[in-house]
């Protein structure tokens, strides 16, 4: 099953963000859920020819909120370390206070995207949910939530990922 068939049209969630095609990314970063509400159809950033348009997504994101916290760390992984990051979450609903009771499960998509490449699971909630579902890869690197991680620790993590 192609992952595209798992997403509704329109899709007012955030199943993943990356540069281009998800299968061409160097590392997968999995969190609990996207915190910033964009209220944009995810498919507006997708092209079957070029994949996900992260630049356009980030232009729209910056109009909503300054880049800080988790988003700043994801951007640092890309700009400082040149990593192609597939950012995704256990739940795809955009909500500031965590996925919540009405979480929109993203695990069928995750099962399609996970493979033998570095996987970083950020935060206890994401780790626990993936573990419950049997989707926590044995090679996953478990970290605290990126929003609580200092840049020195993030840099060490990126060095580890680039040398694996």
Image (tube, rainbow, N blue to C red):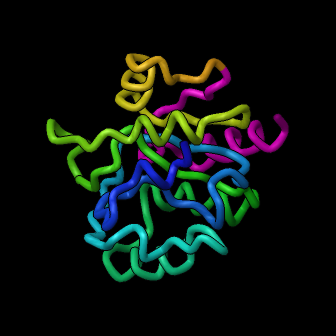
Q: Where residue 73 appears, x then y in whole percent? A: 54, 55
Q: How many dots with numbers?
A: 0
Asked whether, in this view, residue 128 is left or right of residue 16, the answer is left
Q: Which residue is painted at 51% across and 80% down in the image?
A: 56
Verify whether residue 159 appears in magenta.
yes
- Residue 7: quadrant of the picture: bottom left
Q: Is residue 7 left or right of residue 36?
A: right
Is 12 within the magenta?
no
Report the front residue among 22 and 99. 22
Q: Is residue 124 above or below residue 68?
A: above
The image quadrant of residue 20 is: bottom right
Q: Quadrant of the C terminus?
A: top right
Rendered view: 117 above or below 59: above
Q: Can you give x and y, in whole percent of width and height, for residue 156 in the image?
A: 70, 40
Residue drawn at (23%, 53%) of the image:
95
Is 148 drawn above or below residue 68 in the view shown?
above
Where residue 152 sits in the image (x, y, percent)? 64, 45
Name the quadrant of the N terminus.
top right
Range of residues picked out in magenta: 139-164
102 displayed left or right of 155: left
- Please give the name of the residue rendered at 60% of the width and 70% of the height, measured from the top-left corner: 48
Residue nearer the viewer, 151 or 55: 55
């Amino acid at each position: 099953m192609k992952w595209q068939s798992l997403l509704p049209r329109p899709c007012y969630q955030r199943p993943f963000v990356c540069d281009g095609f998800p299968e061409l990314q160097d590392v997968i970063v999995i969190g609990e859920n996207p915190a910033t509400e964009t209220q944009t159809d995810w498919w507006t950033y997708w092209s079957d020819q070029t994949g996900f348009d992260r630049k356009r997504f980030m232009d729209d994101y910056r109009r909503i909120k300054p880049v800080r916290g988790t988003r700043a760390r994801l951007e640092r992984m890309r700009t400082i370390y040149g990593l192609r990051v597939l950012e995704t979450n256990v739940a795809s609903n955009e909500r500031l206070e965590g996925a919540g009771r009405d979480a929109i499960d993203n695990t069928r998509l995750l099962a399609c995207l996970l493979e033998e490449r570095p996987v970083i699971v950020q935060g206890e909630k994401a780790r626990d949910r993936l573990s419950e579902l049997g989707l926590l890869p044995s090679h996953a690197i478990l970290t605290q939530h990126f929003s609580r991680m200092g840049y020195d620790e993030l840099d060490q993590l990126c060095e580890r990922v680039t040398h694996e």
